[in-house]
Image (spheres, helix red, strand yellow):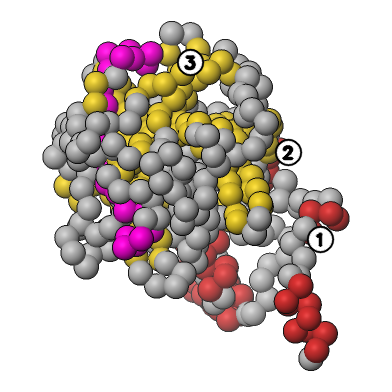
């Protein structure tokens, strides 16, 4: 009898404690006060705003930007070893490939234009370029350290008529596959920006070599064609970007749709062979923004530097399947047309380690006689988007630029006049 009383007493105490804990838990769950001290690293059982749901449910989880492996700022360094003549616009280098390492040194390929005149928009002809990348060839350079480069000269010249690329070849990227080298590039059969075009119509061709130093044998065929009429990539297949992923060649590329301004997005085509045929993904476009978008293996998926243009510009995105990309980080002062050094770009080992540096280009604009003429120069960028590096200076999001930088983005004369009149 006495033991029964003790047992009943214990049950009452336990029930009371459980009831009290439930009351406290329910009070916590229903409270709008997010805990101050030990900020929960796992999602708490309470109502959360959309902003905080993203922290716990998003692609990259965590509170501090310093701990986001896919966040970085970017730092830039001028390159040594490239001659731009008198900087008068007659020599231009832009749109670099990925940087690879072979024969104990780094290699990069890029659009090279050397013409008697700088580009004259809407004034091009057989000898005067209509755009910065018109009348161009693919050149390459090598380096021991990524800062000082030695230009090696032409890799792929323009084709003879009527082959694709007779007008210009530009915007290369490199694929290393089964001990061969493949250079993909935009192949123009009409002048970029020619009357009667949508502005920059072209598709993608490829050249093949047994060595990064060439010689290169052009395929003289389109390997990534334009889409059918009235589809999103009907006119433009720009910025070919190959990776090896899931035992296939994944070719990302930019298309450009109508509208003012035009809508730019990124597509994906897959092949079992570097020369094709490439089959375009049924979910294209797979990235809704960006211009020259660089991608790299990261963990089991692929990450993307989504730069200029679109609602999601200046973002670093991630897709665990290489298709369904989500924003992982937002940054600023993005590299233009980045070509990163990606040691595991073609390994396809499901353990992507990220990137720490690469090359990009800056566009210098010359104004003469009311006409805008341009040329581009190559530069180096550094970052920390690597699982094997921790550089706190690259993770600092509190960037305070020099005052003059802000004033360079001041009002135009027309804007100021309108505001003063109001």
Earlier sequence position, callout 2 versus callout 3: 3
Task: Indicate the position of residue 183 as horizontal and vertical percent values.
Answer: 32, 28
Nearest the viewer among 25 and 139 is 139
Name the residue: 14% across, 40% down: 277
Nearest the viewer among 186 and 41 is 186
Query: How far is disc 2 from disc 3 in space, using C-alphas?
Result: 34 Å
Q: Secondary structure at mark 3?
A: strand
Nearest the viewer among 375 and 284 is 375
- Is disc 3 in contact with disc 1, using a CB cutoff of under 8 Å? no
Nearest the viewer among 20 and 146 is 146
On the question of residue 290 being in view, the answer is no
Name the residue: 19% across, 32% down: 220
Query: How far is disc 1 from disc 2 in space, using C-alphas?
Result: 25 Å
* Tag of residue 407: 1
Q: Is residue 377 above or below residue 106?
A: below
Q: Is residue 383 magenta?
A: no
- Residue extending furthest toward the right: 403
Q: Is residue 197 above or below residue 339?
A: below
């Amino acid at each position: 009898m006495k033991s029964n009383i003790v047992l009943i007493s214990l049950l009452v105490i336990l029930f009371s404690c459980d009831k009290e804990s439930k009351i406290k838990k329910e009070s916590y769950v229903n409270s709008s006060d997010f805990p101050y001290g030990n900020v929960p690293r796992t999602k708490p059982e309470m109502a959360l705003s959309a902003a905080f749901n993203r922290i716990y449910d998003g692609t990259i989880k965590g509170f501090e930007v310093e701990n986001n492996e896919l966040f970085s700022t970017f730092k830039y360094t001028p390159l040594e070893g490239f001659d731009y003549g008198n900087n008068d616009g007659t020599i231009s280098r832009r749109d670099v490939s990925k940087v690879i390492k072979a024969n104990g040194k780094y290699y990069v390929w890029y659009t090279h234009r050397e013409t008697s005149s700088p580009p004259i928009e809407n004034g091009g002809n057989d000898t005067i370029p209509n755009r910065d990348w018109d009348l161009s060839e693919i050149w390459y350079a090598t380096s021991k350290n990524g800062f000082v480069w030695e230009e090696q000269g032409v890799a792929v010249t323009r084709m003879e008529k009527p082959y694709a690329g007779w007008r210009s070849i530009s915007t290369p990227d490199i694929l290393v596959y089964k001990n061969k080298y493949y250079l993909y590039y935009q192949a123009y059969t009409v002048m970029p920006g020619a009357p009667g075009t949508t502005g920059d119509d072209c598709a993608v061709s490829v050249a093949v070599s047994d060595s990064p130093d060439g010689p290169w044998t052009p395929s003289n065929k389109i390997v990534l064609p334009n889409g059918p009429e009235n589809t999103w990539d009907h006119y433009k297949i720009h910025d070919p970007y190959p990776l090896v992923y899931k035992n296939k060649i994944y070719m990302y590329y930019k298309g450009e749709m109508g509208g003012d301004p035009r809508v730019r997005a990124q597509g994906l085509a897959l092949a079992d062979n570097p020369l094709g045929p490439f089959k375009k993904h049924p979910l294209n476009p797979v990235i809704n923004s960006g211009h020259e978008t660089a991608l790299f293996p990261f963990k089991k998926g692929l990450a993307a530097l989504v730069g200029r243009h679109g609602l999601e510009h200046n973002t670093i995105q991630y897709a665990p399947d290489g298709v369904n990309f989500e924003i992982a980080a937002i940054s600023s002062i993005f590299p233009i047309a980045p070509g990163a050094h990606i040691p595991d770009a073609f390994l396809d080992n499901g353990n992507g380690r990220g990137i720490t540096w690469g090359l990009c280009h800056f566009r210098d604009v010359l104004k003469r006689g009311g006409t805008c003429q341009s040329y581009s120069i190559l530069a180096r960028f550094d970052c920390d988007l690597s699982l094997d590096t921790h550089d706190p200076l690259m993770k600092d999001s509190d960037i305070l630029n020099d005052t003059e930088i802000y004033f360079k983005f001041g009002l135009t004369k027309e804007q100021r006049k309108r505001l003063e009149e109001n």
